[in-house]
Amino acid sequence: MKKVYLFGAGTAAYGVISYVGKENIIAVIDNKEKLQGDNILDVPIISFEKFLNENDDEEIVITAAICESIVEQLKKNKINNYSLAPLVTMGNIFNPEQILERCRNKEEIFVLGDDIVMRKFCDYMESNHKECMVNVLPREFGQMEVPENAELLIFGELLDEAEKKILEKYRSKKFVYDFKDNHRYNNLEKYNNLHKGEKCFIVGNGPSLRMSDLEIIQKSNICSFGFNLIYNIYEDTSWRASYIVIADYTVYRAYYDDFVRQASPKMFIKDFYSIEGTPRIDGVNYYPASAYRLYNDRQKFSSDITRNVNGAYTVMYDAIQIAIYMGFKEIYLIGADFSYSKDPVQDGNHVYDGKIKDRRKAVGEYYLDVSFNAFKKAREYADAHDIKIINTTRGGNLEIFERKNIDEVFEEIENSDM
């Protein structure tokens, strides 16, 4: 396959490089000056200006999930040789070897989506299974007819509802295969309704979080969820999260050794594509996640974490879906400030800032509109299923859920236990 540039030095870039091979990537373009000159998996990160000076009309593959501004930037510079990469960071996506095992006895297959990942698959099939003819259908294939006995394979995200309807006729004939392993998470079924009817606290990492509040949660013996690097405050409190949720690959990669040391069945980690330097950790729970663009248009709430957990640029959304799957009926949010500064690594965003130096190489931006839109979906689901989600954060900017004073909540909990 021809070498390409990637645009966007975030989580998806790790996935694409791992899937197609670093030998096929010239460089990763990123507009963040502090990342330029660094690398992802030994692939250099360069500025857009450097690309303009050095490229020979090679294709740009956009790996950034929120990509509208990048598309505009390319159009402004009269660059039309670009495409979108599927968001191949999720661990339930089959690699070419696994796909070949499903197609080995086929003489002809049809693949939906002409993108960098499909090209990798086609190259692999050409080298390893020439007997099978691979036909690549463009995403906007409209009314294009596929033979009734065809095998139609889908990778990653569908674009819209109209396309889904077109595909339904193939699904009904059982000729459609997703390039995803939807059975590797059946072990999560044991958590379904494990805490049916109970209360829990979902503890965010916002700077408003008080150690005294955590002490009360610990004393109350109410189940609680913590996120990512919350363990950095453990020296200041006796509180320990009942469950830990890790949903950011840049955090997972930078602090991987810490998570290995803390590994336990109480840890839930978003399953990422197998990437160099971060093999799977034994003894933890990996959960599947949806990988899609157009977040606000396609945002959903998942009630079955064995199938998928929808992302929204905040680990708290993942945790709410996991908590509801576990059966919790009263969910209290605390430390959910959502008052981030523009720079994600600037002090003041997290309760543990000042205690650690951020080790992350590539740090994504905060997209609060995406997060808040997702929380609206969570509230809709909760209201429809008689579940209470109450925000007890001291201040902050999250106004989608019912607000309640944390001291009143603690008093109610104390009285209910008497």
Image: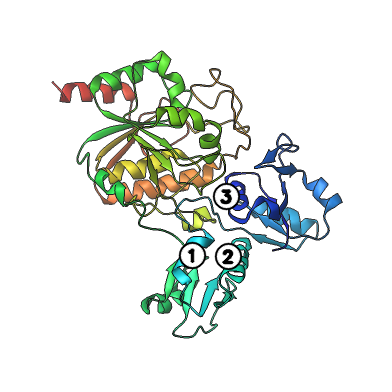
Tag on residue 121? 2
**Which amino acid, mark 1?**
Ile
Say whether disc 1 or disc 3 marks the residue closer to the N-terminus: 3
Tag on residue 15? 3
Say whether disc 1 or disc 2 marks the residue closer to the N-terminus: 1
Label 1 CA crowd tier, 10 Å (few <14, some 14–19, many 20+): some
The x, y position of residue 325, in whole percent, is: 29, 46
> Horizontal placement of 146 versus 319: left or right?
right
**Which amino acid, mark 2?**
Phe
The x, y position of residue 192, in whole percent, is: 25, 46
Quadrant into which the C terminus falls? top left
Q: Nearer the viewer, mark 1 or mark 3?
A: 1
- Above or below residue 316? Residue 300 is below
| Furthest residue in direction right, as rendered | 53
Q: Name which residue lies at 45% across and 42% down.
A: 280
- Above or below residue 138? Residue 192 is above
Tag on residue 364? none
Q: Are marks 1 and 2 in contact (CB under 8 Å)?
A: yes
* Circle 3: element type: helix
Quadrant into which the N terminus falls? bottom right
Label 3 CA crowd tier, 10 Å (few <14, some 14–19, many 20+): many
Say whether disc 2 or disc 3 marks the residue closer to the N-terminus: 3
Task: Give the alpha-carbon distance from disc 1 to disc 2, as whole Å.
Answer: 8 Å
- Above or below residue 279? Residue 337 is above
Q: Are marks 1 and 3 in contact (CB under 8 Å)?
A: no
Q: Is residue 156 visible?
A: no
Task: Give the alpha-carbon distance from disc 2 to disc 3, as whole Å.
Answer: 15 Å
Tag on residue 99? 1
* Circle 2: element type: helix
**Which amino acid, mark 3?**
Gly
Q: Name which residue lies at 21% across and 36% down.
A: 198
